[in-house]
């Protein structure tokens, strides 16, 4: 067989999707697996949003759209960002693309050979490969459980070198649920201004912050011109399968992203864009209702984890993940990867090993609580029984 291109060695498959696949394989054998792996709400997309897309389909909105997105949606996104995030933007500052794709464009546009990109450690699994794919060097910024996994300006300052080009913020965060304080964001932006860095601010979980309030770096003085804000409806409107999202950035950045999109995706799915217009301009009560349910699940999950021997778990301020540490001495001497495999194998509980998210994730598991309270209680019960039998 002919060889793949050398660049393929710089990209690895997503560890979270791999655990999810293992859980699915086990389920296919008839096992009743409690899955804490997947980063998506168990809720269905609210009915009015579906109707918005169905209406668009019926009206024949099935053709290519402008590369950056339909004007109504770009305007709706800019209006929401100005109103809720305080970002001084208009429709010209918006490009519509799935959130993951948006991040890919941002790294492609900003990062070159040898450029250093500061990413949180632990972090969502895709930043590191995306940076490498752009020929950059990911530099982990250590986050501490003791500070609730905030990204502090002190830790960022220590990681900056003359080669640093971009700093990535993700708040609330995957996989830890940690949220940066407004002072963290201000301090990191000051450093970005001082060292002339780009900021990529991944705010996809901003609607799901339970403690404290999110602050967008693009809303601060000197922030907008150097920040790519990434956002989307996947997590807050239960729309993961729609593959929608957006970039908010200065016009020159949107033009760069538009060029990348014009030679790859062409445009985000036409009728799905109409669905998102409905989501952003219609009543927002379903967002609040889902958030309230996630909060109740968080409290159930964290209390249950803390009741397990040898487990420490900071309270996640947002998103829908807990990131507890398991003391191997009380868990059969298993490291996080072995523990996740054993839990799936012996207890039918699927989790993601923390080391998949960076060196600082070692010894932790990520548990998504985007499943029903009954399943959370059942999974915790099985974990306790597993530990008791060790
Ligand atoms: C932190 C973070 N950013 C971006 C994404 C990508 O979102 P989407 O699936 O909407 O492209 C995810 C998805 O899990 C995520 O956790």
Image (spheres, rainbow, N blue to C red):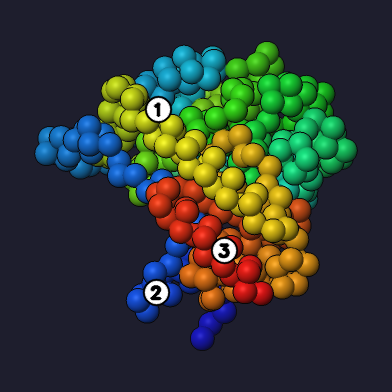
Under circle 3, the secondary element is helix
| Percent of width and height locating residue 213 | 59, 22
Report the label total.
3
| Marks 3 and 2, how far apart at CA | 16 Å
| Percent of width and height locating residue 173 | 61, 40
Q: In the image shown, does 254 or 194 lie closer to the viewer? A: 194
Under circle 2, the secondary element is loop
The quadrant in which residue 105 appears is: top right
Tag 2 residue: 31
Left of 295 or right of it: where is 30?
A: left
Looking at marks 3 and 2 on the same chain, the residue that comes earlier in the sequence is marked by 2
Tag 1 residue: 288
Q: In the image shown, does 382 or 368 lie closer to the viewer? A: 382
Indicate which label's residue lies in the foreground, 3 or 2.
Answer: 3
Which mark, by number, is residue 153? Answer: none
Q: Residue at x 52, y 51 (%)?
A: 368
Tag 3 residue: 383
Q: Residue at x 54, y 40 (%)?
A: 299
Indicate which label's residue lies in the foreground, 1 or 2.
Answer: 2
Q: In the image shown, does 387 or 288 lie closer to the viewer? A: 387
Is residue 187 something one can see in this rendering? yes
Q: Residue at x 59, y 70 (%)?
A: 386
Give neighbour class at mark 2: few <14, some 14-19, many 20+ (Cα, 10 Å).
few
Above-or-below relation of 37 to 80: below
């Amino acid at each position: 067989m002919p060889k793949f291109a050398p660049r393929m060695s710089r990209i690895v498959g997503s560890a979270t999707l791999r655990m999810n696949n293992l859980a699915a394989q086990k389920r296919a054998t008839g096992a009743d697996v409690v899955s804490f792996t997947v980063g998506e709400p168990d809720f269905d997309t609210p009915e009015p949003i579906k109707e918005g897309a169905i209406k668009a389909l019926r009206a024949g909105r099935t053709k290519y759209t402008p590369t950056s997105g339909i004007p109504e949606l770009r305007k709706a996104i800019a209006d929401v960002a100005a109103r809720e995030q305080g970002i001084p933007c208009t429709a010209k500052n918006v490009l519509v693309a799935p959130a993951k794709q948006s991040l890919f464009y941002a790294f492609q546009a900003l990062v070159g050979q040898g450029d250093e990109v500061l990413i949180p450690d632990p972090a969502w699994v895709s930043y590191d490969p995306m940076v490498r794919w752009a020929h950059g060097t990911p530099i982990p910024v250590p986050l501490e459980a003791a500070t609730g996994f905030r990204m502090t300006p002190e830790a960022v300052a220590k990681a900056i070198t003359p080669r640093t080009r971009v700093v990535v913020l993700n708040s609330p965060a995957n996989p830890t649920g940690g949220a940066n304080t407004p002072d963290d964001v201000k301090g990191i932006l000051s450093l970005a201004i001082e060292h002339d860095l780009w900021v990529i601010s991944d705010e996809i979980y901003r609607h799901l912050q339970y403690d404290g309030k999110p602050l967008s770096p693009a809303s601060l003085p000197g922030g907008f011109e150097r920040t790519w804000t990434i956002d989307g409806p996947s997590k807050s409107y239960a729309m993961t399968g729609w593959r929608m999202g957006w970039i908010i950035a200065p016009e020159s950045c949107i033009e760069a992203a538009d060029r990348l999109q014009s030679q790859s995706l062409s445009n985000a799915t036409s009728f799905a864009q109409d669905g998102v217009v409905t989501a952003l301009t219609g009543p927002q009560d379903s967002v609040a209702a889902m958030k309230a349910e996630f909060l109740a699940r968080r409290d159930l999950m964290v209390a249950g984890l803390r009741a397990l021997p040898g487990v420490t778990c900071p309270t996640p301020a947002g998103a829908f993940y807990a990131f507890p540490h398991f003391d191997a001495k009380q868990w059969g001497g298993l490291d996080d990867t072995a523990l996740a495999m054993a839990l799936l194998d012996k207890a039918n509980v699927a989790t993601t090993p923390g080391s998949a998210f960076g060196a600082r994730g070692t010894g932790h598991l990520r548990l998504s609580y985007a499943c029903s309270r009954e399943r959370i209680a059942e999974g915790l019960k099985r974990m306790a029984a597993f530990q008791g039998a060790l």
